[in-house]
Image (cartoon, rainbow, N blue to C red):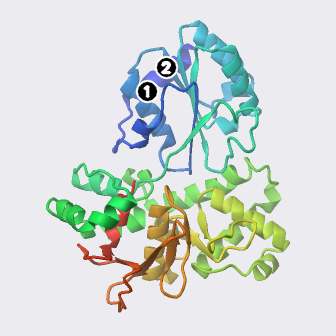
Amino acid sequence: MEAFYRTHAYLVEHTNAPVRRDLMDEINWDDRLIGIKGTRGVGKTTFLLQYAKEKFGTDRSCLFINMNNFYFSGHSIVDFAYEFQRRGGKVLLIDQVFKHPGWSQELRLCYDRFPKLKIVFTGSSVMRLKEENLELCDIVKSYNLRGFSFREFLNLQSGMKFHAYTLEEILSNHEQIAKGVLSKVRPLDYLRDYLHHGFYPFFLEKRNFSENLLKTMNMMVEVDILLIKQIELKYLSKIKKLLYLLAVDGPKAPNVSQLAIEIETSRATVMNYIKYLADARLINMVYPVGEEFPKKPSKIMMHNPNLMYPIYPVKIEEQDVLDTFFVNSLWKDHKVNRGDKSCTFLVDKMMPFKICTEGMKIKNDPGVTYVLHKAEIGRGNQIPLWLMGFLY
């Protein structure tokens, strides 16, 4: 146990989160069992350590542990939690909980046996905490940690402290909001960098970002999908090839029959793999209003623009990058569906948006909101694209 305390103290002391995530204030930390999901690379481990540092410092009542530790190959979470709370422990932070066999049953036992112990754990976005782990459905409070928004990236790079706005606030007051931001910084000076490498916090590390992202994407498939969905290793190459084919095809409806031929599997399996890739936050599926999985999506897009560059950089179209940025920015709190001839997307089934590259002619339908790429400030129903990055 002392070794875990020493590791915890070292990690907390050396944790320096570059951006304080808003989720820190959205979570009800009084709940006894809290799950924090998120795609690989968005900073879940740092988030846990930052919480420990803010609330407890090196106080031994809080302890961070990682299920990668070989100790847990021969010991249960329940036994460890018992010993921890016997020593006065109150808050147990468990990173990568899904690496431990039978983790959900053990968390349930901890919840029932140790009423004075609070457990906060992280897991993959592929996990379905309540749907697939029935023993937790009535006790766990689940939250999602996303990659950096453009606002968070801008704050980090410029030293500012801009806050987020709701979509309604942006639609009704975008000119004043934009003027306030522009009085301090020029967002367009930072947008290109964000689209290329700003979503994942590890761009701050002194390593090649594209190589790091490729490694992370491989881990998403090899660990988050294969391990959690319990898929045999021999199918790994098929899932990777499917992701590549979807990325190269660009944002459009998938030809499921052709994909099934290319990766040598059934149409049903292709659709299941597509769903797993979406759960891993590698792609987004866009449907017409009223349709959803298991129907075929009308458009498959990469989950965020950063993912587009390492796979097939020579084929990237600016329009596709802008569309991907818009969908990813809206995805947290809104439903995005395919638009019709007059608009690119329909948000929350009622708000039409058209994403416009520089120089695109605008017919200016008053019922459509036009999102303009190179505009610093908008007017009426024309809004600068960068402002969509202030939604969280």
Which residue reaches farthest left?
Answer: 183
- Position of residue 3 in the picture relative to residue 392 (left or right): right
Which residue reaches farthest right?
Answer: 266
Residue 260 image position (x, y, % from top left): 80, 76
- Decide: marks 2, 1 in contact (CB < 8 A)? yes
Residue 247 image position (x, y, % from top left): 60, 74
Q: CA distance from mark 2 to mark 1?
A: 7 Å
- Position of residue 45 in the picture relative to residue 192 (left or right): right
- Position of residue 163 in the picture relative to residue 1 (left or right): left
Residue 155 image position (x, y, % from top left): 28, 52
Disc 2 is placed on an element classified as strand
Query: Residue, x 33% and y 85% (percent of image)?
Result: 358
User: Upstream in the sequence, badge 2 or badge 1?
Assistant: 1
Of residues 98 and 135, the one nearer the viewer is 135
**Which circle marks residue 276 in the picture?**
none
Residue 377 image position (x, y, % from top left): 23, 73
Mark 1 lies on residue? 52
Location of residue 258 with respect to 2 vertically, above or below = below
Q: Quadrant of residue 244?
A: bottom right
Q: Amino acid at mark 2?
A: Cys
Q: Amino acid at mark 1?
A: Ala
Q: Are there few (<14), some (14-19), or many (20+) residues within 10 Å of tag 2?
A: many
Location of residue 151 with respect to 350 vertically, above or below = above
Location of residue 381 with respect to 280 vertically, above or below = below
Mark 2 lies on residue? 62
Disc 1 is placed on an element classified as helix
Query: Residue, x 43% and y 27% (percent of image)?
Result: 52
